[in-house]
Amino acid sequence: MSQEFGNNGPEYYDEYEIDLREYIILLWNNKLFIGAIVVLAVIAAFVISSFVLSPQYESEANIIAPNFQLLNGNVVSNEDYIAVLTGDMVMKEILDIVNQERSKDNEIKIQGLLDRLNYSMSENTDQINFKFNFNDPEKTQSILKQWINIFINRIEEFLVNENNSYYKNIENKANADYKKYQTALEKLTNFGSENNLNF
């Protein structure tokens, strides 16, 4: 049995043996065809990258966005910063800047602008990293810089408005309570003067 297996083994391997010489000869015989395909692929890649695809440039910015507590007890977190950055007010301002030199048909929409922006938040620090891609080297940096400045202004306005609103509510409540106090004091004084409480 083992002899039969030993005898059949070499025949089996001879039948399926790979001959590298045949492959090398096949490639050599078709060298012009292969070379033409390589040259066409290089030309196609050059044409597509030069005339079809516009080059992309990237600008990067880092900001410190600390978590802190407002007067009303609410905590401002990284998610709140991102919500302001991608909110309607900020997006409208930055879109006006981006589209001011563009035709109506060539305008960038909100989603198109957001697709060009990547951001990451560090868990260990209060840092948010922004990366913005655009097809113009000068505008790439300028757009991201203006976007961050608009965002910072909106955050400052948001914080001031939130704290002022809370303070105003407390002040209104204090004034209302003081009026109640004055009314109660006046009633007490009147009651004392109208009624003889000495026995």
Image (spheres, rainbow, N blue to C red):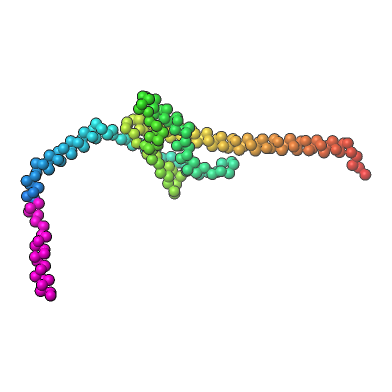
Please indicate, yes or no, whether residue 188 appears anywhere in the rendered image: yes
In magenta stretch: residue 7: yes
Q: From the viewer's perspective, is residue 79 above or below residue 1?
A: above
Residue at x 47%, y 43% (from the top left corner) = 78
Q: Position of residue 37 (x, y in %)?
A: 14, 40
Q: Position of residue 81 (x, y in %)?
A: 47, 40
- Judge from the rendering whether residue 75 lies leftward or rightward of residue 91; answer left or right: right
| Magenta residue span | 1-23
| Quadrant position of the N terminus in the picture | bottom left
Q: Position of residue 7 (x, y in %)?
A: 9, 70
All told, the count of numbered labels is 0
Q: Quadrant of residue 130?
A: top left
Residue at x 50%, y 36% (from the top left corner) = 155
Q: Position of residue 134 (x, y in %)?
A: 34, 34
| Quadrant position of the C terminus in the picture | top right
Q: Quadrant of residue 150?
A: top left
Residue at x 38%, y 25% (from the top left corner) = 104
Q: Nearer the viewer, residue 133 or 138?
A: 133
Q: Residue furthest bottom?
A: 1
Please indicate, yes or no, whether residue 144 appears anywhere in the rendered image: no
Residue at x 82%, y 38% (from the top left corner) = 188
Q: From the viewer's perspective, is residue 18 above or below residue 153?
A: below
- Magenta: main secondary structure equals helix
